[in-house]
Image (cartoon, rainbow, N blue to C red):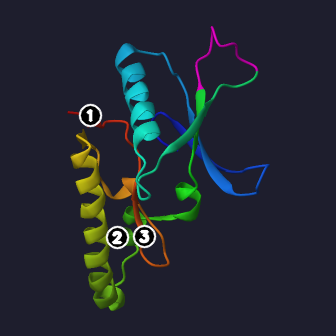
Amino acid sequence: KGSYGYVAKATRKDDGSYVAIKKIINLFQTLPETRRILREIVLLKNCRHPNIVHMIEILIPKHQSVDNFDQIYLKLNSVIVIYKRYLKVIISSLKLRMLSLFLSDALWVFFGLFFRLKYLHSANVVHRDLKPANVLINGQGLVVKICDFGLARII
């Protein structure tokens, strides 16, 4: 659950793979919020790095008409389902006896994070909300992915 909606796991009917569905509510409540959502959609659609969350398609609920709707669903690649651990949980659950393991893994995680930021900055995108909750980490291999581009800007 976030400030603008919810994210849920879903299974594709055609091949059985997992996707994430992000439900955005109160779509046209204010002009700044609408701009923020549109900016996030554009960035999610155009970022095609394997370690950046990207959008597959936009879905409009069937019970709403195209002329009058207040929520949408974004189908995202399965990173949110696969990468269940995010940096905030790892940091908050850190035990003192695991400190040496954490420090060696931390170097790898931060290298991965900086590598992803280099990609974003070379595409003239500034994330502006990079925090532990927006960094997703795979438990096996420590693959790092960046998500939540709601406050991002194209410069």
Q: Is residue 152 left or right of residue 61?
A: left
Q: Which mark is residue 91?
A: 2
Q: Disc 1 residue type? A: Arg
Quarter assignment of residue 103: bottom left
- Measure the C-alpha gap from mark 3 to mark 1: 25 Å
Q: Name the residue under label 1.
A: 153
Q: Name the residue under label 3.
A: 143
Question: Residue at point 40% right, 44% down?
Answer: 47
Q: Disc 2 residue type? A: Ile
Q: Image height check: is 98 above or below 124? A: below
N-terminal label among 1 and 2: 2
Q: Is residue 110 left or right of residue 80?
A: left
Q: Is residue 96 visible?
A: no
Circle 1 SS class: strand
The boundaries of the magenta stretch are 63-71
Q: Image height check: is 107 above or below 52? A: below
Within the magenta stretch, is there residue 67?
Answer: yes
Q: Which residue lies furthest to the top in this view?
A: 67
Q: Given this view, does label 1 or label 2 mark the residue nearer the observer? A: 1
Circle 2 SS class: helix
